[in-house]
Amino acid sequence: MAGKIYQMVQKIVKERSNGVPMLETSAKTKLLLKGINTANYNPSSEDDEKIIKKLEDIAKEWGISI
Amino acid sequence: MGKKVVKIVGKGAEESVIDIKEQLGLVKYKFILYYASFNLDQKVIAKRMKEEFIEAKIIGCSSHMEYDSEGIYENSVVAIALTEDDIEDVCVSVVTDVKDENNTKDALNNFSEYFEVDIVKMDFEKYVGIILVDGLSAGEEKVMDIIGGKTNIMFIGGSASEGLKFDHTYVTAEGIAYEKAAVMALFKVKNGYDIVKVQSVDIIEEKLVATKVDEETRTVCTFNDKPALEEYADKLGVSKEDVAKEFFFNPTCLKTEEGEAYIRSPRVPVGNDEIAFFCGISEGSELNLCKVNGNIVSDMRDALGKYDYKNSKAIFEFICILRTLELVNSGKEQEYAKLFEGSNKIGFSTYGEEFLGHMNQTSTMLILR
């Protein structure tokens, strides 16, 4: 399977930033500091259970349901 | 009307506070931020500052080399005092134990209660914060992580420092000096703010993926599935025995999509294979090698060029102690100070800088317009 990480990242960044560019950059930077480089994922990126779990945890911490 | 920024050089704790009071005068201040040389008794300064400025909310920390808009000093105290003309309002909060995430959450809830707005929903354009963290707590990542997860409000700051003995650093709030703690001030601003982040490195495309990490001790065990020390040395083309000499000149960074570097500086080899850093690195992180470029003055000049900083209400700079040492060793400290001539600036040499997270070899800065 592919694309799940990309979808999760998009959802987290969108929920967190509400489309405000500065907040979008901040959200991506916060993910980067937590070990998720959003630039590495596109719709055809392979699913990786370890990364998916990490994103689920981050979403929970940030109060985002995915 | 008293001055807004004061510096006291070469005096004791008690004398320094008396001088600050004299220079600032009898104005009703809303907020005071100060940095006091590690040589001074931090508990005395904290207590006496609160006694002298009972109506102001006050935070501060210990430091090694303090800045204002005229120079860089040793054995000094620098302070900036803001009135209701400068800020709409301010609230101070303390995280008494940076390793306890509930403490950070409580400190943030305190802001929500004070301003009667949930910090989750606070408008990041109307509110902005300063954070000072015990520089020897190794807890900055945790605090910044919780803040970043809970709110979009930006907190800019630095880690308290001392004379490179690595024994005690202090943060202070409302008359009390703390260790293992963080203090925060959240401003409701009048005319907005700007954030500046400057690092003086060239990013090298060589990649180091932190494949095994002990996050608690900020130690990278393996890069690219090879012993970290060996892989770092290989990428630089130096021997493992000589590699520690390169740590300052060749830090690593996380690179954002926009090409912005968040520097993580190697601190010391651990055994024969591992490297302890001044900053946490999450397992799986893809780091770039960097090379210090020696352009601290020009990089800051370029960054400041985008802002009307000389007419700002206040500038709070948090500059890595490694950058200060680089400035001093190259004799450029006055040239650097002059960039801020005529502005209301104070700063100190930090054991780490905060903005969105924790980082090294960087200047972070908040400008209140």
Image (cartoon, rainbow, N blue to C red):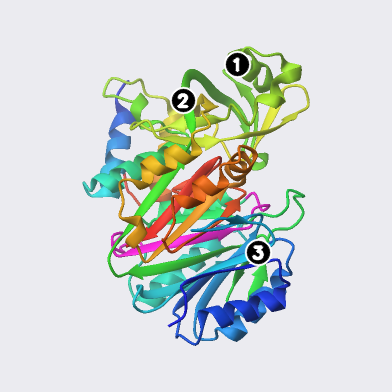
Distance from the alpha carbon under mark 2 to that under mark 1? 13 Å
Q: Quadrant of residue B102?
A: bottom right
Residue B141 appears in the figure: no
The image shows residue B272 at horizontal and vertical percentages of 77, 22
Q: Is residue A22 above or below residue B366?
A: above
Dot 3 or dot 1, earlier in sequence? 3
The answer to whether residue B40 is left or right of residue B142 is: right
Residue depicted at x 30% and y 46%: B306
> Magenta-highlighted stretch: main secondary structure?
loop
The answer to whether residue A19 is left or right of residue A25 is: left
Amino acid at circle 3:
Ser
Q: Which of the two discs, 3 and 1, sits closer to the camera?
A: 3
Q: Nearer the viewer, residue B138 or B244?
A: B244
| Residue position for label 3 | B76
The image shows residue B103 at horizontal and vertical percentages of 56, 64
Label 1 SS: helix
Amino acid at circle 2:
Ile
The label shown at residue A22 is none
The label shown at residue B203 is 2
Label 2 SS: strand
Q: Nearer the viewer, residue B78 or B134?
A: B78
| Residue position for label 1 | B236
Distance from the alpha carbon under mark 3 to that under mark 2? 35 Å
Q: Nearer the viewer, residue B70 or B303?
A: B70
Q: Chain of mark 3?
A: B
The magenta region covers B120-138
The image shows residue B97 at horizontal and vertical percentages of 63, 62
Q: Chain of mark 2?
A: B
Q: Quadrant of residue B232?
A: top right
Q: Which of the two discs, 3 and 2, sits closer to the camera?
A: 3
